Image (tube, helix red, strand yellow):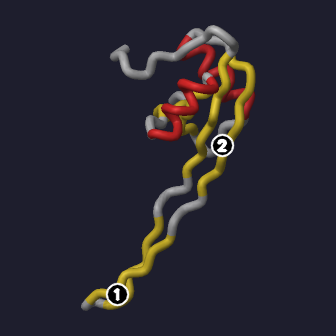
Amino acid sequence: MSILIKPIITEKATTNSELNNCFTFQVKTKANKVEIKKAVEAAYGVSVEKVRTINVRPDRSTKFTKTGVQHGKTNAVKKAIVQLAEGEVIDLYTNM
């Protein structure tokens, strides 16, 4: 399987890609910066200058129901912000 799971397309990520040429991806939690750089360069054919990673902790929730207290949590996610070289661009909106 690929290290890149999906691109993150939010208002903040889109603004960052337009102004700073940085694109955000959700990646596997065990991936390191070197693997992420190679995966982006292979998948999109661009040159990567810098990779920054973020580990997002799981959110925990408690619900009080008729059957008792229900505990739950979301999955932990790792994000990678990839800065491309000057003049390079990734078009995330076209179908491949």
Residue at the spot of label 1: 64
Tell me which amino acid carries mark 2: Lys
Asked where in the image residue 33 lies, by quadrant, the reply is top right
Q: Nearer the viewer, mark 1 or mark 2?
A: 1
Asked where in the image residue 63 lies, by quadrant, the reply is bottom left
Residue 73, how many percent across, how many down?
47, 67
Q: Secondary structure at mark 1?
A: strand
Q: Is residue 3 visible?
A: no
Taking 27 as reference, is 93 above or below it? above
Q: What residue lies at 51% left-to-right and 30% top-to-bottom?
A: 1
**Relative to 33, is 21 on the left or the right?**
left
Q: Secondary structure at mark 2?
A: loop
The disc label shown at residue 88, or none: none
Residue 67, how many percent across, how many down?
27, 89
Q: What residue lies at 57% left-to-right and 32% top-to-bottom?
A: 16
The disc label shown at residue 30, or none: 2
Closest to the observer: 77 or 19? Answer: 19
Q: Is residue 50 visible?
A: yes
Report the residue that reaches farthest toward the front.
19
CA gap between label 1 and label 2 equals 35 Å
**Relative to 82, is 73 on the left or the right?**
left
Residue 5, how many percent across, how many down?
49, 34
Q: What residue lies at 57% left-to-right and 37% top-to-bottom?
A: 27
